[in-house]
């Protein structure tokens, strides 16, 4: 089972967004049969079986084992991942594209950059798992409190200068065997409480 799987197929994304199927995926973090799931989620076994077949068809659940019980073969399934992220690639022509209107100060552009990050890292995870290799990544996540908009703007300018300095020091356009890496640095207000 993968820790996180990225869904880039539109049909699989649609299947995963159904509330009953999402609940089944959550329950199948641990292997279970349709009979066991029916009891947990309060649906008839036949209906659970229908949802399991749909999830299996799209690669979201997999067979762990088959158990013979009298004349019936019980299929024990599990989710293919502990959690899922839907890639913007599943949206096709309407996926966010940061190259359309690059604006460092736009929240819409930040969202498009974040969507590109999900799409890119999702593709890297999928490829690395197929190749059974690790992906070299690094992230920083933190919170900073500014006393004023002026301080926030000054911070953003200093951060930009520091990143530009690091890039100019380490970037080697002509390095043989070198590999390009993307850098995404974002600053946005923290969500401190859920909206009512």
Image (spheres, grey):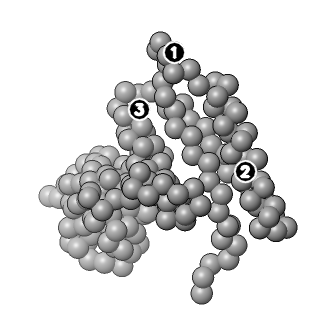
Residue at point 77%, 67% (across, down): 149
Residue located beneath label 2 in the image: 157
Residue 108 in percent (x, y) is at: 49, 65
Asked whether the residues under the numbered discs 3 and 1 touch, taking CB atoms below 8 Å apart as contact, a structural biologist would say no
In this view of the protein, which residue sits in the foreground, 171 or 71?
171
Q: Residues within 10 Å of mark 2 (few under 14, many from 20)?
A: few
Quadrant of residue 48 within the rendered picture: bottom left
183 left or right, relative to 76? right
Reply above or below: 59 against 167: below
Residue at point 41%, 28% (across, down): 132
Q: Secondary structure at mark 2?
A: helix
Report the disc number at residue 165. Answer: none
Reply above or below: 96 against 163: below
**Of callouts 1 and 2, the N-terminal one:** 2
Q: Residues within 10 Å of mark 3 (few under 14, many from 20)?
A: few
Residue 163 in percent (x, y) is at: 68, 39
In three-dimensional space, the C-alpha distance between marks 1 and 2, rounded to whole angstroms, equals: 29 Å
Residue at point 51%, 21% (across, down): 173
159 left or right, relative to 35? right
- Please tell me whether mark 1 or mark 2 is closer to you in this view: 2
- Outermost bottom residue: 196
Residue 42 in percent (x, y) is at: 36, 79
Quadrant of residue 162 within the rendered picture: top right
Residue located beneath label 1 in the image: 175
Q: Residues within 10 Å of mark 1 (few under 14, many from 20)?
A: few
Report the disc number at residue 128. Answer: 3
């Amino acid at each position: 089972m993968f820790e996180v799987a990225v869904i880039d197929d539109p049909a699989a994304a649609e299947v995963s967004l159904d509330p009953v199927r999402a609940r089944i995926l959550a329950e199948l973090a641990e292997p279970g049969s349709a009979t066991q799931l029916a009891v947990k989620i309060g649906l008839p076994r036949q209906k659970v079986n229908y949802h399991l077949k749909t999830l299996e068809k799209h690669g979201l659940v997999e067979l762990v084992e088959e158990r013979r019980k009298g004349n019936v073969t019980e299929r024990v399934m599990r989710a293919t991942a502990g959690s899922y992220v839907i890639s913007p690639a599943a949206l096709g022509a309407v996926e966010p594209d940061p190259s359309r209107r690059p604006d460092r100060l736009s929240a819409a552009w930040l969202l498009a950059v974040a969507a590109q990050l999900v799409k890119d890292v999702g593709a890297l995870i999928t490829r690395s798992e197929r190749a059974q290799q690790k992906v070299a990544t690094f992230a920083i996540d933190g919170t900073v409190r500014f006393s004023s908009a002026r301080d926030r703007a000054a911070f953003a300018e200093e951060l930009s200068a520091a990143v530009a300095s690091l890039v100019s020091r380490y970037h080697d356009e002509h390095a043989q065997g070198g590999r390009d890496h993307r850098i995404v640095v974002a600053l946005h207000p923290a969500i401190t409480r859920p909206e009512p």
